[in-house]
Image (spheres, rainbow, N blue to C red):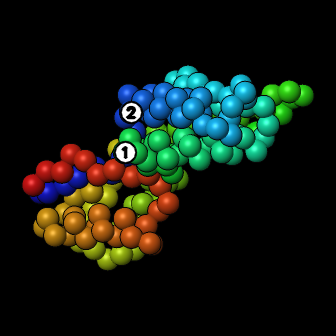
Amino acid sequence: MPSFDIVSEFDRHEATNAVDQANREIQNRFDFRGVDASFTLEGETVSIEADAEFQLQQMIDVLRNKLIARGIDPRCMDIQDAQTSGVKARQQIKLKQGLEQPDAKAIVKLLKDSKLKVQAAIQGDKVRVSGKKRDDLQQAIALLKGEDGPDLPLQYDNFRD
């Protein structure tokens, strides 16, 4: 019986490369001359630091572009509130990985409501979708990638025929 898994994850090595590239770009940009701004990756959290809060927004855009260039979906970024203290402004960006239970349930409900001939089962932090025909599975992927699908960074792997 054909099946595939729906997961939400990113390549940690590519995230490290994206943060390094963003640091290099910030050091070379004219509007950041003389500004003490930096990105730091600690586990699954990116800490950004600059002199002013508006610069943090520019740095988030730079990081988003570098993540996209490295093949990481920018929807995995969970941007926290900025903290300003006198001279410095700091902000945390958490890189989300894994499907949370409510999101997995929403995916299963969406697939069941679509009347496709597929079965979806939650298995830890992923959802396994199986069906009798490969075409049904491809329709399920198209449904999840479409406008009605969830606003989550989803990947489809472990496709078995």
Please state which of residues 21 and 70 is positioned toward the viewer in this rendering: 21
Q: Residue drawn 39% across and 70% down?
A: 146
Q: Residues within 10 Å of mark 1 (few under 14, many from 20)?
A: few
Is there a contact, CB below 8 Å, between mark 1 and mark 2? yes
Q: Position of residue 69 (x, y in %)?
A: 40, 45
In the rendered image, residue 157, in percent from the top left (x then y), is placed at 25, 47
- Determine the residue positioned at 28% across, 74% down: 116
- Which of pointers 1 and 2 lies earlier in the amino acid sequence? 2
The secondary structure type at the circle numbered 2 is: helix
| SS state under label 1 | loop
Q: Residues within 10 Å of mark 2 (few under 14, many from 20)?
A: some
Q: What amino acid is at disc 1?
A: Gly
Quadrant in which residue 45 is drawn: top right
- Is residue 31 shown above or below 119? above
- Using the image, determine if residue 155 lies above or below residue 32: below
Residue position marked by numbered label 1 in the rendering: 71
Give the quadrant of residue 39.
top right
Task: Assign the C terminus to one quadrant of the image.
Answer: bottom left
* Residue position for label 2: 14
Which residue ends up furthest to the right in the rendered image? 86
Between 50 and 25, the one lying in front of the other is 25
Quadrant in the picture for the N terminus: bottom left
